[in-house]
Image (spheres, grey):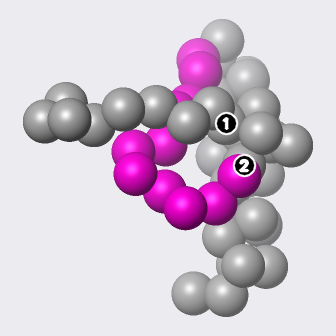
C-alpha cells in the first residue's frame, strides 16, 4: 500500500470511529496518523 492509500483508509476509519464515539490506536505502525486522530498504541505482547 502506498502512503496515500494508508492516509485515505485512516481518514475513513477515523470518521467511522468518531461517529460511534470510539478511539483508534495503532499497533507498531511506522506512520504518524495523528492528523486523523489515530494515536500510537502498544501491542498486547509488547
Q: Position of residue 11 (x, y in %)?
A: 78, 52
Q: Residues within 10 Å of mark 2 (few under 14, many from 20)?
A: some
SS label for mark 2: loop
Gap in angstroms between the C-alphas marked 2 and 1: 5 Å
Image: 27 above or below 31: above
- Where residue 38 is drawn, which disc sits there? 1
Q: Are marks 2 and 1 in contact (CB under 8 Å)?
A: yes
The image quadrant where one finds the C terminus is top left
Residue 20 occupies which quadrant of the picture?
top right
Q: Position of residue 4 (x, y in %)?
A: 79, 79
The image quadrant where one finds the N terminus is bottom right
Q: Position of residue 41 (x, y in %)?
A: 46, 31
As drawn, the residue found furthest toward the right would be 35
**Disc nearer the start of the sequence (2/1):** 2
As drawn, the residue found furthest toward the top would be 21
Identified at 13% across, 36% down, the residue is 45
Note whether residue 26 is visible: yes
**Which residue, given by chain and number where applicable, does mark 2 sit on?**
33
As drawn, the residue found furthest toward the left would be 45
Is residue 6 part of the magenta span, yes or no?
no
Residue 5 occupies which quadrant of the picture?
bottom right
Magenta stretch: give its range: 22-32
Magenta stretch, overall SS: loop
Amino acid at each position: 500500500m502506498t502512503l496515500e492509500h494508508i492516509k485515505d483508509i485512516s481518514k475513513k476509519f477515523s470518521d467511522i470511529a468518531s461517529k460511534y464515539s470510539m478511539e483508534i490506536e495503532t499497533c507498531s505502525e511506522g506512520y504518524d496518523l495523528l492528523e486523523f486522530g489515530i494515536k500510537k498504541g502498544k501491542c498486547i505482547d509488547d
